[in-house]
Image (tube, rainbow, N blue to C red):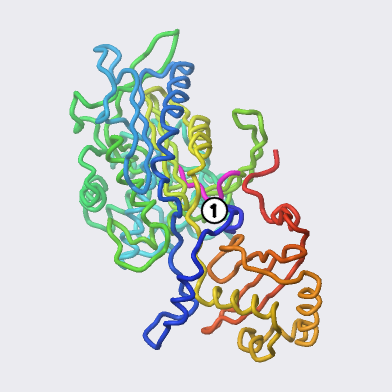
Amino acid sequence: MNYRNATIGLWIISLAFFDAVSTTANSASPPAWVATPPSFINPDRREQLATAFPEIDERVRTFLAREKVPGAAWGVVIDGQLVHVGVEGLRDVASQAPVQRDTVFRIASMTKSFTAMAILQLRDAGKLSLDDPVEKHVPELRTLRYPTADAPRLTLRHLLTMSAGFPEDNPWGDQQLAISESRFNELLQEGIAFSNSPGVAYEYSNYGYAILGRVVARVSGVGYREYVRRKIFEPLGMRSTTLEPSEAPADQLALGYRREDDIWKLEPQLADGAFGPMGGMLTSLEDLSRYVGVFLDAWPARDGSSQGPLSRSSLREMQQIWRTRPSAVTRDTTGALQLTSGGYGYGLRVSQTCDFGHVVAHSGGLPGFGSQMRWLPEYGVGLIAFGNRTYTGWGAVFDEALMSLRRTGALMPRQVQPAPALVEARRGVNSLLQRWDDAEIDRLAAMNLFLDRSKDRRRTEFRVLSEAMGACRERPGFLYSENALRGDWLLDCERGVVHVSVTLAPTARPGIQHLELRKWPLNADVSAMTGLPPQACPR
């Protein structure tokens, strides 16, 4: 996803630091294209974000009262830590037992990312491939009838990305949660209806994730519930998480309800069964924050060993779009238009909005429950919430909560750091504006630079610009950057502003492959005048 769409703003970076790095380089130093990982630049970020918590709590409580949700728990996760918790209402209406911080709720389809994580663990261990035909691990599907003669054989990747071609099955799938393995066998042997050929379209399928759970059990040699307990819950310290409601302490378990005839009617807690891998999990705020935290910790890509149940690279892989969905235009709670595009990763929904360039989320809904987790990988911030009313819808509340955090001024993404080669290119280009030097431009240029525009023409452009603008001085930092090898910066000159854009080549010594200089009046709003991407869609 284009990082420009996620952020714009000044890089507040000390160029002196990078100058020191480049001047002390030796044979043992990393290549000039290796940059420091992106980082947060606001030392008071957490404290400022915390000022939004009272407003978030107020908005959540207003939502719960309006929607008549018996009980709920919600939390804010920053840099992998649960930094704020809110609770409201009753976990058990009959006994009037209140929701508490450690109350365990069923999270329904949020279970799917655990199943996807298990598949990737087995993939990384060399025990399966995502492109394996499903029938290799679930032989009951060898006789599956496909919709057309040219349909590809169903693969694990199809199931992971909701592109198996099975029809959307939420109402039906919810009621399959507790079925036995023998009944599951019968369903598989009877066949599966297709609404599309595999691999051509997104369509949400609980059935597909139930099949993936069986793959986990077959390949690992232990039951799905036991596998995720050993390989995910225990490594993350998720002591309250289970797939079987009877395993949760009675004094911590939230009961599920539906609102009917203006009274609360208890929904039975379905036992863990063959469809558990698609939506059977129960957990607490503390446990889920640990799980969300491991996904947040996967960013940014960096050196050092991975801690947790899955490598950072595989966790980032889960959070990428692997099957697109149609874009949608909706109105937010203020009535403003909002464009959302994205698709499905591995057990996670991934999207881009006008406000945020990379949003990862999943909701969960079953009779009696509704939950959601959502996080912003580049911002290090996540939200989690549970409710014990059927399909409690947290989407709009989470939108409002993120806007509350943004209004603090501290909800900003990590800032990309320039590679030493980009810092060196900046220094060289700036010096050429003051005094042209053929040897210096030859040293900085990639092999294509003068083929695209001759050296003589470049020399003339620099001379004309220098004469027009007068003496210039560097403005601190970069205007913005898409990555460590591409950046824009400004120079404040006697008679205007010079805007420089540079992109370096993909070579071991990254020379300048693209170079543009533009002039603007003094005090110009360069972002507006050059069409740099705004931080949000036009309203």
Q: Position of residue 453 (x, y in %)?
A: 77, 82
Query: Is residue 357 a member of the stretch shown in magenta?
Result: yes
Look at mark 1 in the image and give the residue it sits on: 323
Q: Position of residue 331 (x, y in %)?
A: 64, 32
The vertical placement of 315 against 264, above or below, is below
Residue 360 falls left or right of residue 311: right
Residue 244 at least partly seen: yes
Q: Secondary structure at mark 1?
A: strand
Query: Is residue 159 a member of the stretch shown in magenta?
Result: no
Check the picture and name the quadrant holding the C terminus: top right
Residue 1 at least partly seen: no
Q: Position of residue 50 (x, y in %)?
A: 40, 36
The vertical placement of 520 against 57, above or below, is below
Q: Which residues are magenta?
A: 355-361
Instruction: Decide which of 171, 193 is in the foreground and name it.
Output: 171
Q: Residue furthest bottom?
A: 439
Instruction: Decide which of 110, 458 is in the foreground and name it.
Output: 458
Instruction: Decide which of 361, 165 is in the foreground and name it.
Output: 361
Query: Amino acid type of disc 1?
Result: Arg
Give the residue drawn at x 67%, y 66%: 491
